[in-house]
Image (cartoon, grey):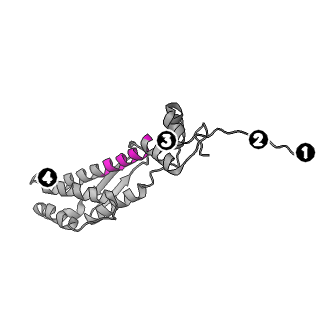
Amino acid sequence: MSKTITQTIEVFEYEDLKTNDELCEKIYQNFWLDNPNNINPWADENLNSFKKFAETLNMQLDYSLSNAEYPDRGCYIKLDTSNYYYKAPNKRAEHISLLLKDYTGNGYCFCADLKDYADKLISEWHKDYSIDEFAEDIQNRMFEMWFQDNQDYFSKEYFLNDVESNSYEFTIDGKLF
C-alpha cells in the first residue's frame, strides 16, 4: 500500500528579505557567509591581474591569500625585486615607467588600478625611495585590493542584489529552493 504525503514548505524571496530584517540576516548568514563553497567569482581574475602586473614589472610574485573578507595570519603578498639589483638605483623608476608605458594588463580593472597606483609612486619617487619600498607599496596595494573586493562581494548589499537578479527563493533555514 502506498502513501502520498504532501508537505507545505514556506519559501521566501527578495521582497520578504527586504521587509524582514531578522529573516534577511538569518538567510544572509546561512546561505552567503557560512557557505564554504561561496567564493568571490572574480578571485581568479584578481589573482591573474596581480600575476600579470608582477610579470610586467619583471618581479616574481609569491602569495598566500584567503577567500574570506579579512586576512588571516597566513595571508601575504610578496614581490621579489632581485632582478632590479642589476639596475642603477637612479634608473629604476625610469625602467619601471618604461615597462608600464603601454601596459593594459588582462583588461580587468585591477590592472588599471595597479598601473595608476604605480604611476603615482613613480611620479613621487625621490632619491631615498628604494625598489624594495616601491615593491612593498605595490604589495600592500594588492593586499588591500584583494580583501576590499572580497568585503564588497560578501556584503549584504551584494547578497541582496544577487538574490534579486537571480530570483532566488529560500527556505527558512537559508537553503536555496
The residue tagged 3 is: 33
Dot label at residue 129: 4
Say whether disc 4 or disc 3 marks the residue closer to the N-terminus.
3
Q: Which marked residue is nearer to the observer: mark 4 or mark 3?
A: 3
Query: Which residue shows up at 15% across the image and 61% down it?
Result: 93
Query: Which residue shows up at 37% across the image and 61% down it?
Result: 48
Q: Is residue 15 above or below residue 100?
A: above
Query: What element does badge 1 sit on?
Result: loop
Tell me the amino acid under the disc marked 1. Met
| Alpha carbon separation for disc pair 2 and 4 | 73 Å
Where residue 158 sits, quadrant-wise, is top left
The answer to whether residue 1 of the structure is visible from this angle is yes
Say whether disc 2 or disc 4 marks the residue closer to the N-terminus.
2
Tell me the amino acid under the disc marked 4. Tyr
Span highlighted in magenta in the image:
142-156
Residue 144 in the image, given as x and y percentages of width and height: 31, 47
Say whether disc 3 or disc 1 marks the residue closer to the N-terminus.
1
| Alpha carbon separation for disc pair 3 and 1 | 45 Å
Dot label at residue 67: none
| Alpha carbon separation for disc pair 4 and 3 | 41 Å
The residue tagged 1 is: 1
